[in-house]
Image (spheres, rainbow, N blue to C red):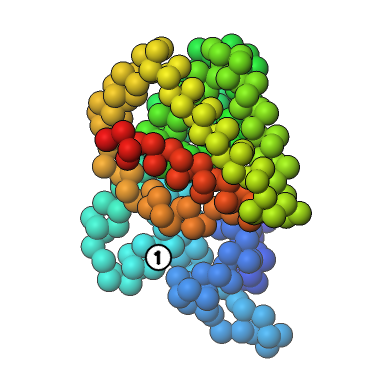
Amino acid sequence: MYPSATPPREVKIGDAAAFAGTTPRAIRHYHQIGLLPEPERGGDGRRRYGYDDMIRLLWIRKMSEAGISLDDMRAAFDEARDVEDVLGRLEETLAAQEADIKRQRAAVQRLRVVGSPLGLLSPLVTDRLSHLPSGALRPSDLDALLVTERIFGPLGAAIQASVFITLAAHPGLRAEADRLDAADAALDDTVDPHDPQVEELAAQHCAHHKALEQAMAAAGLDEAEENLFEIYDADLTGDEEDTQMSAFEAVSKMPYGFSAARMRCMELTAQLLYGDLSAGS
């Protein structure tokens, strides 16, 4: 005859966790949130779990495997919410997860095709720049696009991409841009904001910006930018506003650590550019 095992009336938390396929820590959490009633402790001060407790733990695991949240489990056990409501919420969650996975796979595919961090930016930006030869985009260019995309969205970064397309096609303009970047970096905290070199550098920035605009117009990039608006509007899903902060809020949260001299150079450059625009209108 085979020996027959006599099941215990109650078990300790470790045995309960092992049978239910969970952990003692998870069971203690279920107690804390009211998902599993906390049983009385035995003479040794330890909790003891009976048949009803084990049934509840097994159902919790099955619900967890189905993706049902702990809050919805608690409501279902308390019969505070109709099961159809719980399943409806679960369907919405799974649909959102599927959309996230689809976006992640698309990003990975773009990375493999592009072969650089450019593939992590939005498709609107990536598509405009993926044809550039290797090395045409500097790491600082990608950094600038990343920040612009966060502040002004994919459309703003895609429009900014015209600058880098132009720089890639005009070595002279690229060399001047690099020189100006180095001059900007030299405007550290030791430079007086009212030093004449600050005004001179602002004038050089203004001239370089105008040269870029002329080159972009000659290449027809202004027309390409107009087409971007149509492409962007067609790709809108309606969910963008949920994750996109306002430009003002984004600018107020992005630290740069520019010196007073560099800030004044930027302000003077803007005054020169916008002054010319208003004078010409």
The amino acid type, in three-letter code, at marker 1 is Asp
Residue 200 in view of the camera: yes
Q: Residue 10, image x and y in percent? A: 59, 73
Q: Which of 82 and 107 is in front in this view?
A: 107
Q: Quadrant of residue 169?
A: top right
Name the residue furthest right: 190
Residue 200 appears left or right of 243: right
Taking the image as shown, residue 209 lies to the left or right of residue 257, namely: left
Instruction: Identify the residue position indicated by label 1 in the image.
Output: 71
Residue 133: image location, x then y, percent: 59, 11
Secondary structure beneath label 1:
helix
Q: Which residue is drawn at 43% across and 19% down?
A: 214
Q: Quadrant of residue 19?
A: bottom right
Q: Is residue 133 above or below residue 146?
A: above
Label 1 environment density (alpha carbons within 10 Å; few <14, some 14–19, many ≥20): few
The C terminus sits in image quarter: top left
User: In the image, 74: left or right of 255?
Assistant: left
Q: Position of residue 190 (x, y in %)?
A: 76, 54
Residue 271 lies, in percent from the top left, at 45, 45
